[in-house]
Amino acid sequence: MRAVAARVRGASVRVDGEVVGAIDGEGLLVLLGITHADGTGDVERMARKLWELRLLDGERSCADAGAPLLVVSQFTLYGDTRKGRRPSWTAAARPEVAGPLVDAVVAALRAHGAHVETGVFGADMEVASVNDGPFTVLVET
């Protein structure tokens, strides 16, 4: 499981022109990718890392600050660009595997007390953010 977490001062996701998820103020925009080797054992590790990661101002986490997270599924995090000019997506899990695991990470974050907004799995989404810093890190389980 792989995520890119960006410290933001607001972020939103639109599908067909309508906002489906948004956070205001300080928080994290999380682009979450799932690969074939990922399973339910990775869910809690990823949720805890994202919830407790000290990326916010003053080295605080979302848990410390009560800051929201916007989680957007992102299979392209497993794109392989080592050969040629066209990325290969073979490392990304199939939607029937990835979708439930993305949902499980969101549920685990909420179980920790996080306010979580989401995109729509598999949809063509427009993601907008006001990056703070910019401060962006790769998170893996």
Image (spheres, rainbow, N blue to C red):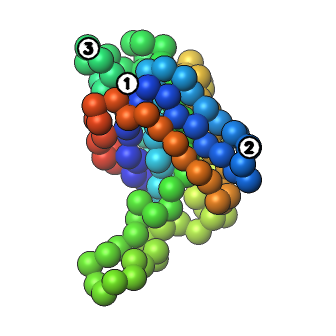
Badge 2 or badge 1: first in the primary sequence: 2
Residue drawn at point x = 46 percent, y = 64 percent: 76
Q: Secondary structure at mark 2?
A: strand
Percent across and percent down for residue 60 are 32, 16
Percent across and percent down for residue 44 are 48, 37
Q: Which residue is mark 1?
A: 52
Q: Alpha-carbon distance for marks 2 and 1?
A: 31 Å
- Amino acid residing under circle 2: Glu
Percent across and percent down for residue 93 are 53, 66
- The answer to which quarter of the image holds residue 28 is top left
Q: Which residue is mark 3?
A: 58
Badge 3 or badge 2: first in the primary sequence: 2
Q: Secondary structure at mark 1?
A: helix
71 sits left or right of 8 in the view: right
Q: Which residue is mark 2?
A: 18
Circle 2 Cα neighbour tier, 10 Å, few/some/many (<14 / 14–19 / ≥20) = few
Residue 29 numbered mark, or none: none
Q: Is residue 11 above or below residue 88?
A: above
Badge 3 or badge 1: first in the primary sequence: 1
- Amino acid residing under circle 1: Glu
Percent across and percent down for residue 51 are 43, 27
Would residue 107 be visible to someone looking at this image? no
Circle 3 Cα neighbour tier, 10 Å, few/some/many (<14 / 14–19 / ≥20) = few
Viewer-closest of 120 and 14: 14
Would residue 33 be visible to someone looking at this image? yes
Circle 1 Cα neighbour tier, 10 Å, few/some/many (<14 / 14–19 / ≥20) = some
Residue drawn at point x = 47 percent, y = 47 percent: 31
